Image: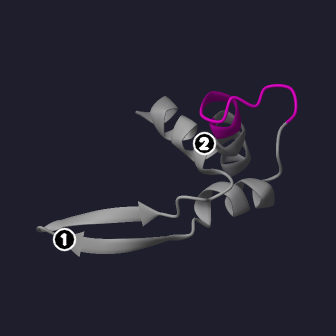
Amino acid sequence: MLGYNLMNLFKEEVLNQTKTKAMVATIRDRLFLIPGKLVHTARQWVLKLEATWAYRDEYEEALTRLG
């Protein structure tokens, strides 16, 4: 029940899905299975994302809501 409530809170607050909510598998496919490469340069880890990724805008909007 806690996991279900946390996922609903994530959908409403971070993804701004109040009326129509996506299923967990859809969110996982769009936001967590990201085509990218983790690179270590200048003593820092950098995540390089694909420039033509279809859900990039949705991902960046979610990041701004988190931060």
Horizontally, is 64 left or right of 59 in the view?
A: left
Which residue is depicted at the point 87% across and 33% down? 20
Q: What's the magenta region?
A: 10-20
Q: Is residue 26 left or right of residue 5?
A: right
Where residue 18 sits: x, y (%)? Answer: 79, 26
Label 1, secondary structure: give it: strand
Residue pictured at 62% horizontal, 67% vertical: 33
Instruction: Give above or below for 38 relative to 30.
Output: below
- Near mark 2 (Cα within 10 A), the count class, few <14, some 14-19 or many ≥20, is few
Q: Which mark is residue 56?
A: none
Label ID, residue 41:
1
The residue located at (25%, 66%) in the rendering is 45
Indicate the quadrant where residue 14 lies: top right
Q: Residue furthest left?
A: 43
Q: What residue did someone put label 2 on?
A: 57
Q: Is residue 38 above or below residue 50?
A: below
Question: Residue 42: x, y in percent?
Answer: 12, 67
Q: Earlier in the sequence, mark 2 or mark 1?
A: 1
Location of residue 67 (image quadrant): top left
Label 2 to label 1: alpha-carbon separation: 25 Å
Instruction: Give amino acid for label 1.
Output: Thr
Nearest the eye: 67 or 38: 38
Q: Residue furthest front?
A: 52
* Identity, as a three-letter code, of the amino acid under mark 2: Asp
**In the depicted view, which residue is nearer to us: 19 or 58?**
58
Query: Regarding mark 2 in the picture, which secondary structure is present there?
Result: helix
